[in-house]
Image: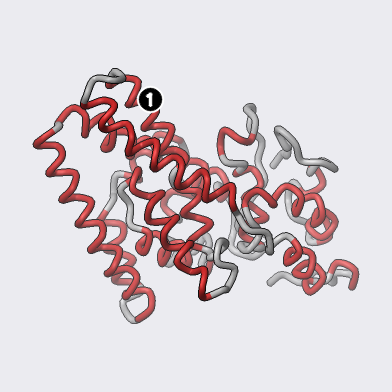
Amino acid sequence: MEDLNIADEFSFDKEKEIARSFSKRFQWEMILIGVGQALVWLSLWPLVIFNIIPLWVGFIVATLCACLAYLPSHEAQHGNYSRGNPKRRWIDSFVSHFSLMTLAFPHDLLRCTHMKHHAYTNDPIKDVDYDTATAKSFFEVVVRIQEGATKYEEFAEIYKDDASFMRSFNKGVLIGVGYRVALLTLVVIFPLQTLLLWWLPGKLGTIYTSTFFSWYPHYQTEIGRYKNTRFWSHLVPRYFNHSMQLHFIHHLHPGIGHFDEPKAIEALKPFLIARQVPGAEDIPARVSLNPLITT
């Protein structure tokens, strides 16, 4: 962790104390979004199959659901529903598994690789998102996403001696096989519906997620706690990209719930300026519809 002879009033301990005050609230919004989009997506199948709604409408709604599917799982991967309470861990697991149906991605695989992303952000060997973060264009992001299973096999080799990682990884692989079997079965019975309600929306949702979670927040950043993520500007309101302009605060304090990040950014702005975080001085006094943060 960088030390710039920070004044006591901006010490890391005080930074953590403020962050903890935003890391207590139950994340009911994320549960509503995660479970809600999955239920909407499931309802599309009978609605389309029985010609209650046209397939093109189902495709549009399914794509929107796919774009909403990852963030609730992301909160679960960090345990932000259970908050360390063993009796509530089932909520993390349930919300993540249920929400990720739309993307056909296993919770356990994403969780173990995402934890390594946090531990080794921007490390060219150990960071699972490094290939996406270093893409030079949106087109390159799309191309790199297509590596799919090959990419995860490489990280299984890198972390083969990490027993905890491999347990989660192997469990995720089994669930992933289950998704593939379900897709292959459905494509035989309902070929066009499977293509436009699951496979293609899942691909588009993955591109959306990779662009705003992996590429923009880490593009052209370095290794280091206060250097590995960035603030950035966007022309549209932040709700259209899950407020990922504020993703910097998540990497500093992953326990802060997503909907509490704006207030946390406002409170921690003096600390980020003291640490000479690029863009920190441009954080507005109040983060609203669009934070208007420059890089």
Up-down relation of residue 204 to residue 215 (above or below): above
84 relative to 97 in the view: left or right? right
Instruction: State which quarter of the image contains the N terminus.
Output: bottom right
Residue at 80% x, 57% y is 268
Q: Which residue is mark 1?
A: 60
Q: How is the image coloured?
A: secondary structure
Q: How many marks?
A: 1
Up-down relation of residue 159 to residue 55 (above or below): below
Q: Nearer the viewer, residue 266 or 7?
A: 266
Residue at 44% x, 40% y is 37
Whether residue 210 is visible to the viewer of this picture, yes or no, is: no
* Residue 171 percent location from the top left of the image: 28, 68
Q: Nearer the viewer, residue 18 or 223?
A: 18
Up-down relation of residue 27 to residue 160 (above or below): above
32 relative to 50 in the view: left or right? right
Whether residue 120 is visible to the viewer of this picture, yes or no, is: yes
Instruction: State which quarter of the image contains the C terminus.
Output: top right
**Mark 1 surroundings: few (<14), some (14-19) or many (≥20) residues within 10 A:** some
Name the residue furthest left.
188
- The amino acid type of the residue labelled 1 equals Ile
Circle 1: element type: helix
Up-down relation of residue 206 to residue 119 (above or below): above
Q: Nearer the viewer, residue 164 or 28?
A: 28
Residue at 26% x, 55% y is 149
* Residue 259 percent location from the top left of the image: 65, 48
